[in-house]
Amino acid sequence: MAKKQTIFECQHCGTQNTKWIGKCPNCNSWDSFIEIKLKNLVSINPKYTTNNKALALNEVEVSKIEYFSSKEIEFDIVLGGGIVLGGLYLIGGSPGVGKSTLLLKTSLNLAKEKSILYVSGEENPTQIRLRAERLGKIENNLFLLNSIELEDIEESLKTQKYQICVIDSIQTMFSNAISSAPGSVSQVRECTFLLLRLAKELQISIFIIGHITKEGSIAGPRILEHMVDCVLYFEGDPSKELRILRSFKNRFGATNEVGIFEMGQNGLISAKNTSKMFFNQRDSMAGSAISVVLEGSRPIILEVQALVSESNFPKRSATGFEINRLNMLLALLERKLDFPFARYDVFINIVGGMKVNETAVDLAIIAAIISSYRNRPLNNKSAFIGEVSLIGDIREISNIDLRLKELASYGFNNAIIPKKTKNNYGLKIFEVSDVTKILQWM
């Protein structure tokens, strides 16, 4: 009996099957299997032999990682100090958020000192040239390659010495050795593997732009994120100026670092006075509270806004804050303080488009909600920092000294926190151990 010459592969997760099925058993996607010929499904990576031998851990020579600046302060912070030669970086984000603009401007800045190859499968050289002119810079060391064939990219990188290469985007690239269409799981996986090998062998820093799915994750197989050295996500509303670059994986530095950019006439620029972008030192208004969150190693002061309004059909909405945690805090206030929020709409907003996952803002959320409910403004020189538990006590949070120092630098006078500290940095510290104690500030 002759062997089958084809297999079927899910284009969402890469699961393979000997026959076509309507629903993927792994990722539950419908109608995602396509047919692939086995004779063309071969690895594009050549076989080679090495004389490497296993070494004892104490015999391994430690080589220092050398960084060079991207010429953008915020970009360097997220990368962990700068770009590393031989590093493979993946940047994802929604359409129009500015991924290509960020990498093109970085390429133009670095082209003064280094040779850079910019590969575009989505724009032609004329479009890139016009965009570079809008950014105000044209550099001779920036080379453009308008191709989606991986073999062309490999030849260019091996023919001329480049220090940096930008791939825009990985979903448009394909290899002639694979029969599936560009953007398929097989193509994305094999193209990324070859780029990884080229980055390590030629000591080239390669930046890959990746599209994201409706769920907000980078399109393609999960192995894509495992193969690269650094995974960055670019966030922000295209209709607003603020953009946030987050690090979710970094083999060369700390994760969860954040870079803040502003979109202006000259493209993306590193934001100045970043904390002031997330709060406004105006006169006190009901429903507004200040807190401090840590993004990586950076403290950021932000404003929490709340709107509480009586309604026959109560709604809950949170922008930049987890809705399930908001429901938990409201249930706690009803139980501990007898607030009738079951008859009120409650809306929460984190100013500036910041998405907060840290529980240190719990106390500020509660303060803003009560302030709006009672229509009593809070002191605009006070900040609320603390995690609220299910039983109503206020728990300590990490790096309180770093947060208090940031508050003092912006002229705040008071800090309401779970426990007093010796280093108050000139602030008046007020201790609150239980959620009921917050009422004295209302």
Image (cartoon, rainbow, N blue to C red):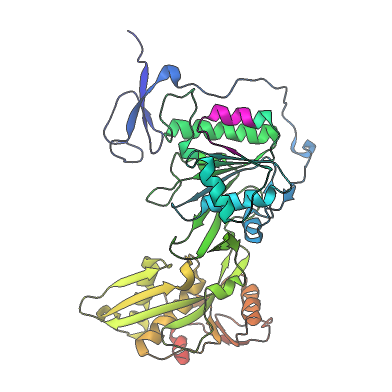
Q: Residue 118's x, y, as percent? A: 59, 41
Q: Residue 18's x, y, as percent? A: 34, 23
Considering only vertical position in the picture, is 10 above or below 257? above
Q: Image check: 87 left or right of 213?
A: right
Q: Residue 252's x, y, as percent? A: 66, 49
Q: Nearer the viewer, residue 260 or 397?
A: 260
* Residue drawn where x is 34% and y is 29% of the image: 34
Q: Nearer the viewer, residue 174 or 409?
A: 174
* Residue drawn where x is 54% and y is 84% of the image: 281
Considering only vertical position in the picture, is 112 above or below 176? below
- Magenta stretch? 144-156
Q: Residue furthest left?
A: 312
Quadrant containing the N terminus is top left
153 magenta-colored: yes
Q: Residue 414's x, y, as percent? A: 58, 87
Q: Please tell me in which quadrant of the rendered image residue 167 appears.
A: top right
